[in-house]
Amino acid sequence: MNIESNQACLYIGENDVERADHDLTQGFVSIRSCRAPDKATINEDAAAIIPFGRHALILAVADGVGGTPAGREASKRAVQSLRSVLARTEPLVENLRPAILDAVEEANRGIITHTRGAATTLVVAEIVGGQIRSYHVGDSELISVGQRGRLKLRITPHSPTGFAVEAGLLDEDEAVQHDQRHLLFNVIGASDMRIEIGTPMKLDIRDTVLLASDGLMDNLYVDEIVEIIRKGPLAVAADELVRRALERMTGPDGDSPSKPDDLTVVLYRPRT
């Protein structure tokens, strides 16, 4: 499906498989989401593509925690809050940071009040004026790479392994299969939730931005992901990420990582 519009699009686990390519004034976006192989329950991931005016774009991925229907409700509430708060924001506003923070806080209050025991991760990319800024809670991923494969931006997951890799105490490839990989210090749905805000960074014309749930990050190494997304058609890269991850989930190869899970990827490139 190719959508040529500037309307907000939410993907909230209603279908086992989601596949869409968006041609927007702000750039090109591909979204892929699918339920874990052989999983009986619903897809607990959610994603949002929210254009704001002609030159700003908000991308988000949320991964419901807990393996219950409440996980889906939490991830859905997170992206719905983003859409609703931005819809109430004055269209000429240039600084979207307050609106994004308000949306995350609103989602947190709503989950605590209405979906007791539920939680979700959330990663948000704010793309405006040729720059990207990250916001995240939990361990969903955001990276930005150049056409030659240089990793320009990567957030630090709010987990023991994420902090250990950042401190140089654990190798990235070891972290993928570490037994504490899925412990989280920070989630939406907790009274002590905190939002980590990145520093704005310039995006070059041929850069590629990836947002993903851990269904991708638990099954492919970062260098494999970078090699797939750094060049070529965006839709082809998105399909290849999903194909490789599902292949690992269903048929692990030797010492390669393998963990069946819901999988969501969002890829973005600026217009040339």
Image: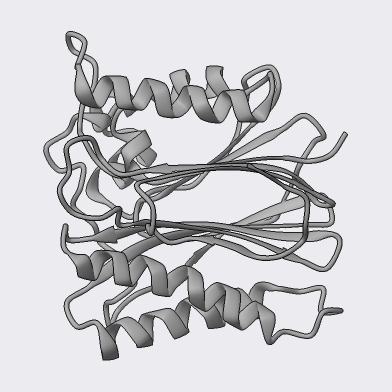
Please provide percent x and percent y for residue 99: 63, 79
From this view, report whether residue 50 is shown above or below residue 82: above
From this view, report whether residue 55 is shown above or below residue 192: above
Asked whether residue 185 appears in the rendered view, the answer is: yes
Residue at the spot x=68%, y=17% of the render? 148
- Horizontal arrangement in the rendering, residue 156 relative to residue 197 (left or right): left
Please provide percent x and percent y for residue 106: 46, 85
Image quadrant assignment for residue 189: bottom left
Image quadrant assignment for residue 262: top left
Please provide percent x and percent y for residue 190: 27, 77
- Horizontal arrangement in the rendering, residue 54 relative to residue 158 (left or right): right
* Quadrant containing the N terminus in the rendered view: top right
* Quadrant containing the C terminus in the rendered view: top right
- Horizontal arrangement in the rendering, residue 28 relative to residue 248 (left or right): right
Q: Which residue is outermost to the top?
A: 254
Residue at the spot x=55%, y=77% of the render? 101
